[in-house]
Amino acid sequence: MRVVAIINQKGGVGKTTTSANLCHAIAESGKKVTVIDLDPQGHLAVSLGIRLQQHGGIDEAMRGEKTIQEQIIQVRHNLQLITSGSRLQEIEQLTGNVSHRGDLLKNALQTGLDDQDFIFIDCPPSSGLLVVNALFACDEILIPMTSDFLALQGLSHLMGTVKRFEKVLKKHYTLWLVISRYTPNRKISKQVLNILLSHFPERVLATAIKETTLLAECPSFGKTILEYSPESRSAKDFRKLANDFLEGKVMYGRK
């Protein structure tokens, strides 16, 4: 089982869009996927058509009040969701030993998901205790990136955090970058992409997800792009991205 944290501390980079559509595309390919909404805003659950107030979530599992199995919602074929829950934000205010507070998610995931091929963790756009828990629990990090220079600054900050955790936890994360909200006819987009390719060789997944209005419309219907417009370019791109991730296909050279 691969545990993947989808992280970017900068907002507006298409993180939840990537989480919902990539997880559905991987599940559609036949893999068993569990996705955890670790963002107190609960946007991932909404994107998948789930009303948060109707379900407990990862908040209760991290507190030891419920098991992971009790919090699972089957949302699509081969795809199950664990919502954020109404009290997830309270985790950020917990006091006590740092390593113990950072282990809450990892401990919650110890049992009940052994039959899954992937666990994806959709993280909040922050650098607080919830992201710490994701980094304790995961072995791989997937970073959605927009092609602008402010996104590069945010990535630099995130990589500093990742390096510190690798040192403290004595582990090495497998790193993947996804180009989201890409506008190929903008000069700046190609410049930023080339910077990423030079600094992260063989880490940028081969398919870039282009900016489209269809992707912005999907969440209001509680559907992924694979359901909302299955023959669209965006749906085809996410299916290709899923294949890239499963097979480790990456971009090479300048674009």
Image: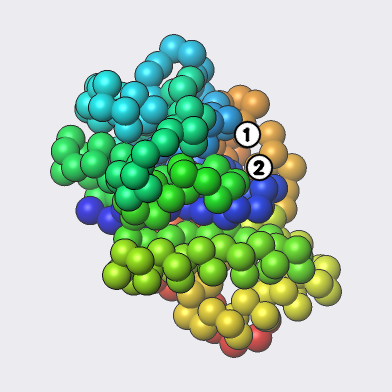
Dot 2, how many residues are within 10 Å of its Cα: few (below 14), some (14-19), or many (20+)?
A: many
Q: Nearer the viewer, residue 235 or 245?
A: 245
The residue that disc 2 covers is: 215
Residue 77 in percent (x, y) is at 33, 34
**How many dots with numbers?**
2
The quarter holding residue 69 reads: top left
Name above or below for residue 229 compared with residue 203. Answer: above
Q: Is residue 50 left or right of residue 173?
A: right
Q: Is residue 17 left or right of residue 153?
A: left
- The amino acid type, in three-letter code, at marker 2 is Leu
The residue that disc 1 covers is: 218
Whether label 1 touches label 2, CB < 8 Å: yes
Residue 156 in percent (x, y) is at 62, 70
Residue 61 in percent (x, y) is at 30, 28
Q: Is residue 160 visible?
A: yes
Residue shown at 44% from the left, 57% from the top: 242
Name above or below for residue 22 compared with residue 249. Answer: above
